[in-house]
Amino acid sequence: MREASRIGLAALTLAPVAERAGWSKSGLLRHFPSKESLQLAVVHRTTELFRERVLLPALSSPAGAPRLRAIFRNWLSWIADNGLDGGCPLNAARLEFDDQPGEVREALVAGWNDWLSYLERQAAKGIEDRQIRTTLSPRQVVMVAIGLASACDSMLRLLGVRQAVREAERAYDQLFTSE
């Protein structure tokens, strides 16, 4: 994950990972027989870590708008500090593999579809319960939230705008807080 964060998932190969881990390339090949299997392992482990840090803590919030807000806050915290020097490998991978056929893309698509479905269910509940007052559909609410998270990531990581997390939180609240 650390190497994929630094150089991108598409550029990840066995040799630098083995070197960083202090293993021989042949030793690493026993665990990951191909570049694709290594990339898939990174996708799965990063997804697990993302869920542990972003989704699971939010489950203590009531379903609907409060949970969606907690998820969004946790997501921004993940963007700001996920423990990986180069940021989230999944964020870069969605751009690297968006038009590349294969198992890695399929794993990314499946993970994103699961994530979007969950977020849409929370947005739908929030709209139905009038916790979110909007004319947007649940999918559109999720698209806006993802857009804010992506913009925050770019502003923070690429442009060095330190207040990006705070600005994204304020924008979310202005758009989706019904009070």
Image: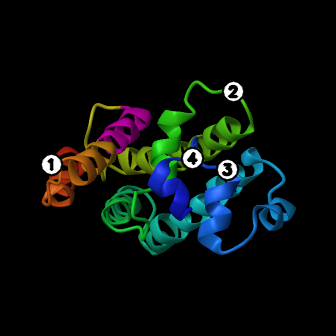
Identify whether 24 is placed above or below 147.
below
Q: Which amino acid does label 4 sit on?
A: Leu
In the image, residue 51 lies at what x, y percent?
A: 54, 64
Comparing labels 3 and 1, the label whose residue is closer to the camera: 3
State which tag comes first along the sequence, 2 or 4. Answer: 4
State which tag comes first along the sequence, 3 or 1. Answer: 3
State which tag comes first along the sequence, 1 or 2. Answer: 2
Mark 2 lies on a secondary structure that is: loop
**Which span is picked out in magenta?**
137-147
In the image, residue 130 lies at what x, y percent?
A: 31, 49
Q: Which amino acid does label 1 sit on?
A: Gln
Left or right of residue 16: residue 80: left
Distance between mark 2 and mark 3 Cα atoms: 14 Å
Residue wearing tag 2: 101
Residue at 21%, 59% (x, y): give it.
165
Residue wearing tag 1: 174
Report the magenta stretch's main SS: helix
Residue at 17%, 48% (x, y): give it.
171
Mark 3 lies on a secondary structure that is: helix
Residue wearing tag 3: 39
Asked if the residue under mark 3 is in contact with the one under mark 4, i.e. CB atoms within 8 Å, the reply is yes
